[in-house]
Amino acid sequence: MYLLVYVDDILITGSSPEAILELITKLQHKFTIKHLGQAHHFLGIKIQSFKDKYFLSQRTYAESILIQSNLLSCNPVANPSSTKVQSSVPQDSHLSDASTYRRIIGSLQYLTITRPDIAYAVNSLSQHMQNPSQYDAHNLKRLLRYIKGTLTFGLPISKAQLSLQTFSDADWAGDPDTRQSTSGYCTFLGDTLISWAVKKQNTIARSSMELKYRALALATADTIWLKRLLQDFHIPHNQPIKLFCDNTSAIALALNLVFHARTKHIEIDQRFV
């Protein structure tokens, strides 16, 4: 049996419905709590139960963000961000207001709990919260228009073998101002996506191989933590975890223990992986 507590919200699950009811009864004798039955909403997340899976979504929350932005009836777009740098963008006094921009970005960060497809766009926009420009407001509006067309998107949780596999990727020198790169990874438990992150790298990568390897190290750290978390849930994971990377040089470096002088600066990441 597992009991999840967040401030005054409690979620209980387990393999024995009788034991769960017994625990709830004991808790009601000590605390003023309500038994709301099968979980349908938790912390603004809608939980839909099906025969072989659950589906987590935040449609109502996403619509509230669109209302804040005055974009509830806007026209949707097909992708959350644009790779083209436009020389001029339309003026938007509402979204370019610093306080409004920060409030909406903060709300979008909570939306990424069930929307990994917007994680990269939200990460990019969050880097300009101190002094957003008209260009940042334009990109924020584009993201909100994408959300308008994908309100039904969410996170499926299905029954499958409890084995971990991680995918790693990175965007080389994607920041036009600092030329820092962005790492990204996601980890699946069976067929269910359980962890993902987008993070700007602290140092400037001088090659795509170095970039991919630093992203691989970041993904490895998260994967090790997830394996230990599974052990806390008494789920053994004895088989090797598959870690995927799309860079041939980075994969070759992971398999090669002999270092050339030019790769010495990333030896720490290589040893860690």
Image (tube, rainbow, N blue to C red):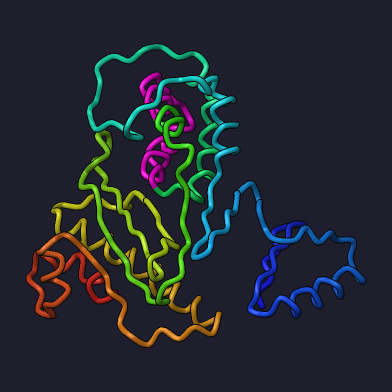
Q: Nearer the viewer, residue 42 or 195?
A: 42
**Prevailing secondary structure class for the magenta stretch in the rendered image:** helix
Q: Nearer the viewer, residue 132 or 25?
A: 25
Q: Nearer the viewer, residue 182 or 12?
A: 12
- Give x and y (percent) for residue 10: 73, 62
Q: Quadrant of the N terminus?
A: bottom right
Where is residue 251, by image quadrant? bottom left
Residue at left offset 25%, top offset 56%: 169
Q: Answer left or right for 219 relative to 116.
A: left
Identify the residue at the far front of this view: 51
Relative to residue 178, is residue 96 depicted above or below? above
- Give x and y (percent) for residue 113: 51, 51
Residue at left offset 45%, top offset 72%: 226
Q: Quadrant of the C terminus?
A: bottom left
Asked if residue 88 lies in the magenta stretch, the reply is no
Relative to residue 12, is residue 22 depicted above or below? below
Q: Nearer the viewer, residue 267 or 117?
A: 117
Where is residue 17, by image quadrant? bottom right
- Give x and y (percent) for residue 179: 23, 41
- Give x and y (percent) for residue 11: 69, 64
Residue at left offset 69%, top offset 68%: 12
Residue at left offset 91%, top offset 70%: 30
Relative to residue 118, is residue 250 depicted above or below? below
Query: Which contiguous range is marked in magenta?
Result: 117-142
Q: Answer left or right for 83 relative to 127.
A: left
